[in-house]
Amino acid sequence: MKSLTALFIFISTAFISNSQVYKLPDLGYAYQDYAPFIDAKTMEIHHSKHHQAYVNNLNKAIVGTALETQSLTDLMFYASYRSDVVRNNAGGHFNHSLFWDNLAPVLVQTEISAELSLAIKEQFGVLDSLKVKLNQASMGRFGSGWAWLMVTPDKKLAISTTANQDNPIMDVSKERGIPILGIDLWEHAYYLSYQNKRADYLTALWSLTNWGSVSAKYATAIKDSLLIEIEKDSWPALKDFHKVMAQTFHPSESGNLQPLRTRSTELLTKSMLLRISVPPKSLDKKELHDALSRLEKACHSINEQVNKNAKDAVLIKAIAGAHDIFHEVQGLCHD
Ligand code: MN3
């Protein structure tokens, strides 16, 4: 009986997996419901062929690999560490899902929220001037890509564009934030009806934009802790220090002190550069500067110990101490 139970547990767990397998989202409306602004054939090919291909290629690239258990956000956030296949198809899936979400036939569209309306008013004046700016950005993007309205780490709205299937969540993008509205600038989005006339397609797209949906994305983005992660990631001195800290501390945990012994001067230099760097505005406070000073002192002392050829045990304790202070710094970035 015992072995039967064990067999049952084995069989049932064999079918439980944490794997992320992505699926093509439903549009919510029939392909012909977006006409006359976007014709049914374009909608069908764009959704069932192009977007489906991004989903298929993403699944093919990650299933059976360590990336399988990562979230879509993580796949994109660390785009610079990913293969082009993962970067392009994770972006392709996310970008198109956002795009469809914000499109609705005229009769079922919902209203813009008071909050988003106010934010637009403060930064762009009237809604029409936001549209003009987004159109200009879209016309200025050469070749295939996307134009974005996004929420930046300082909780403002901003417009940007990216090439290919990149987006502002990705660490490869110059302008970072959480996109709440995306405009697909690939010719496959408009060629059948508009051929090379991107401007006409943009005009048509505004007729399908569901501001109620954009408003819901704004409300979520403004509270999303991903904004803090993006802000920290945009602080190069912190990233630089983090890299050396990770590459020296983690080997030391398993008793390998060689990386620390060879790179203690570099660790000290990065800690000094970090202390004198200018943190992003919202993280800039006294506690953070105090912690950065203590971190530099700790790295200074590690470097001295290495120069004195201190024993492994001494160095393990010293780097663990510095690592604790580094975590404190990262914690302060979360407040
Ligand atoms: Mn597309």
Image (spheres, rainbow, N blue to C red):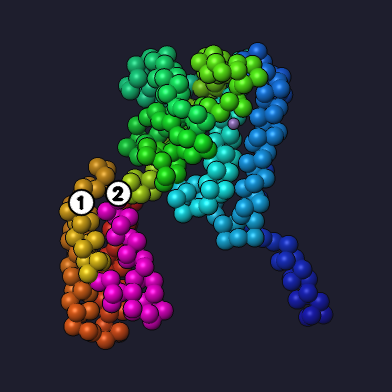
Q: Position of residue 72 (x, y in %)?
A: 55, 48
The answer to whether residue 119 is seen in the rendering is: yes
Q: Vertical placement of 221 versus 254: above or below?
A: above
**What is the secondary structure assignment of the residue under circle 2?**
loop
Task: Tell me which corner region of the image, top left, top right, bottom left or bottom right, holds residue 330.
Answer: bottom left
Q: Are marks 1 and 2 in contact (CB under 8 Å)?
A: yes
Q: Label 2 crowding class (10 Å Cα cut-off): few <14, some 14-19, many 20+?
A: some
Q: Vertical placement of 205 versus 224: above or below?
A: above
Say left or right for 1 vs 299: right
Which numbered circle lies on residue 277?
A: 1
Task: Tell me which corner region of the image, top left, top right, bottom left or bottom right, holds residue 53.
Answer: top right
Chain part drawn in magenta: 235-264
**What is the secondary structure assignment of the residue under circle 1?**
loop
Q: Which residue was labeled with disc 2? A: 235
Q: Vertical placement of 295 versus 84: above or below?
A: below
- Viewer-proximal residue among 127 and 108: 127
Instruction: Tell me what residue is drawn at x 62 percent, y 21 percent.
Output: 191
Q: Is residue 252 magenta?
A: yes
